Image (cartoon, rainbow, N blue to C red):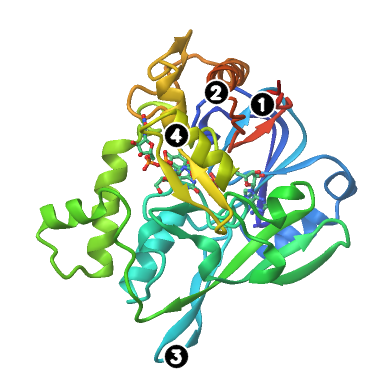
């Protein structure tokens, strides 16, 4: 067993949650860390174009993918340090994120419960600092283990090195540089649960969880998510297609004065505010808007969906239309959240 499997001219249709058709010149599924070192020594892998692919839940393939695609399938989870108050848990890149959340809950470790049911892998979680229901994964990351393609070295980056922000990190800004092989999490055994996000208290009350445990918070959030978001198994999508725009406080206040009802949320510091991209799209009359098989979801205006035969190019064209309409109506520029492979996003400007 070599520890990896190579596929030439590989179909990517089953490897992206939009379920758009695309092909890769060479796809390598890697099952062992030693095999990764061997593969990384090949000149084509070292110097040519390389794309890391997890579960494909935050990616749009617009064109064929040249070079090599690496898919890390190492699956180990273990406790490295076990203290009374916290533990350090190490998970390899190929572990499914939701499996890790349930594993930690099963070991009575807290912190990841609000991030339940986010699709994808552990290796991709730091890329956009996945977040939901008031929690971002960066808060719990102790170390990211990564291979640096620039220096050809394995390294350990601590939380500060990773420069986490809203749907942002060092890794997202340097997409061709880092191969994340494992992530180490610092997880407390006791902490105040985050249960104030809209809808969560009501869901917990409906469950009869007056003094909720972490597993019940996860259950409540899983129920909310299942109702709010289209299931990619049924209808191809990549979750939120756009980030919520972050505006200067004055600009957000002026916009909210002009457009009563606009949801405005706190951002990373007091001088900034996030405004709801879903609301802006919906106010443009675009919820459910369909352009061939690419559409704005009926269920949630921030999600673009594939009704069957949309290509990545169709999805991208629809996204550009949506961003243009929102800009014309509100003067706010939307930015895509998923990685677009094979085309460049055209920012909308005046
Ligand atoms: P992929 O889509 O395969 O890749 C995403 C990016 O990460 C690409 O740039 C890829 O090159 C890079 N990458 C992947 N693995 C590695 C690695 N090992 N090393 C280096 N780079 C790597 N996101 C949220 O933050 N919050 C949500 O609530 C949320 N909800 C979602 C709901 C749905 C229905 C869907 C479909 C998506 C949702 N997402 C959400 C987006 C998505 O789940 C996350 O971004 C997830 O982390 C992507 O993981 P993946 O393994 O599928 O990554
Ligand atoms: N809204 C609308 N129309 C809609 C849907 C929502 O007006 O069709 C309004 C709601 O009324 C609400 C507001 O938009 O006031 C926010 O909606 P929601 O709570 O669904 O959150 P979101 O801002 O749309 C963000 C993340 C999600 C994450 C949820 C929960 C981004 C880009 N998206 O969505 O992450 O799960 O909050 O925390 O930040 C993802 O990144 O793929 C993703 C799904």
Crowding at dot 3, Cα within 10 Å, few <14 / some 14-19 / many 20+, comes out as few
Indicate which disc residue 257 carries: 4
Given contact means CB atoms under 8 Å apart, are the residues at marks 2 and 1 in contact? no
Picture coordinates of residue 224, whole percent (x, y): 27, 45
Pick whichever, 298 or 323, lies toward us.
Answer: 323
Quarter of the image for residue 183 reads bottom right
3D distance between C-alphas at marks 1 and 4: 48 Å
Residue 244 appears in the picture as rendered: no
Which type of secondary structure does the marked residue at label 4 adopt? helix
Q: Earlier in the sequence, mark 3 or mark 1?
A: 1
3D distance between C-alphas at marks 2 and 3: 46 Å
Quarter of the image for residue 204 reads bottom left
Q: Earlier in the sequence, mark 2 or mark 3?
A: 2
Q: Can you identify the residue that label 3 sits on?
A: 83
Crowding at dot 2, Cα within 10 Å, few <14 / some 14-19 / many 20+, comes out as many
Which type of secondary structure does the marked residue at label 3 adopt? loop
Q: Residue at x 86, y 41 (%)?
A: 48
Q: Residue at x 41, y 34 (%)?
A: 262
3D distance between C-alphas at marks 3 and 4: 50 Å
Q: Can you identify the residue that label 2 sits on?
A: 20
Q: Residue at x 43, y 31 (%)?
A: 278
Foreground disc of the pair 2, 3:
3
With 200 as the anchor, is 230 left or right in this view? Answer: right
Q: Can you identify the residue that label 1 sits on?
A: 23
Q: Quadrant of the C terminus?
A: top right
3D distance between C-alphas at marks 2 and 4: 40 Å
With 188 as the anchor, is 39 left or right in this view? Answer: right
Which type of secondary structure does the marked residue at label 2 adopt? loop
């Amino acid at each position: 067993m070599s520890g990896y499997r190579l596929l030439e001219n590989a179909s990517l249709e089953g490897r992206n949650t939009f379920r758009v058709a695309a092909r890769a010149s060479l796809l390598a599924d890697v099952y062992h860390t030693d095999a990764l070192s061997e593969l990384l020594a090949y000149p084509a892998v070292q110097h040519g174009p390389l794309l890391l692919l997890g579960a494909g839940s935050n990616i749009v393939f617009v064109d064929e993918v040249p070079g090599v695609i690496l898919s890390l399938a190492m699956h180990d989870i273990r406790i490295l340090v076990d203290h009374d108050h916290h533990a350090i848990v190490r998970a390899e890149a190929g572990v499914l994120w939701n499996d890790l959340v349930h594993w930690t809950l099963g070991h009575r470790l807290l912190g990841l419960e609000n991030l339940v049911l986010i699709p994808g892998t552990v290796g991709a979680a730091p890329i956009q600092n996945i977040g939901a229901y008031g929690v971002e994964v960066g808060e719990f990351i102790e170390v990211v283990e990564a291979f640096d393609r620039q220096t050809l070295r394995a390294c350990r980056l601590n939380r500060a090195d990773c420069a986490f922000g809203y749907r942002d990190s060092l890794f997202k800004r340097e997409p061709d540089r880092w191969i994340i092989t494992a992530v180490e999490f610092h997880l407390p055994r006791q902490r105040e649960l985050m249960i104030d996000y809209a809808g969560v208290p009501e869901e917990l009350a409906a469950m009869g969880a007056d003094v909720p445990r972490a597993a019940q918070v996860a259950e409540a959030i899983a129920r909310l998510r299942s109702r709010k978001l289209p299931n990619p198994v049924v209808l191809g999508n990549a979750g939120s297609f756009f980030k919520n725009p972050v505006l200067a406080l004055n600009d957000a206040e002026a916009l909210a004065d002009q457009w009563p009802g606009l949801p405005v949320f706190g951002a990373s510091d007091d001088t900034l505010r996030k405004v709801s991209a879903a609301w802006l799209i919906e106010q443009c009359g675009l919820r459910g808007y369909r352009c061939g098989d690419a559409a704005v979801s009926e269920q949630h205006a921030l999600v673009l969906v594939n009704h069957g035969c949309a290509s990545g190019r169709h999805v991208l064209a629809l996204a550009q239309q949506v961003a243009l309409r929102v800009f014309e109506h509100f003067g706010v520029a939307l930015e895509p959240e998923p990685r677009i492979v094979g085309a460049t996003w055209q920012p909308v400007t005046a």
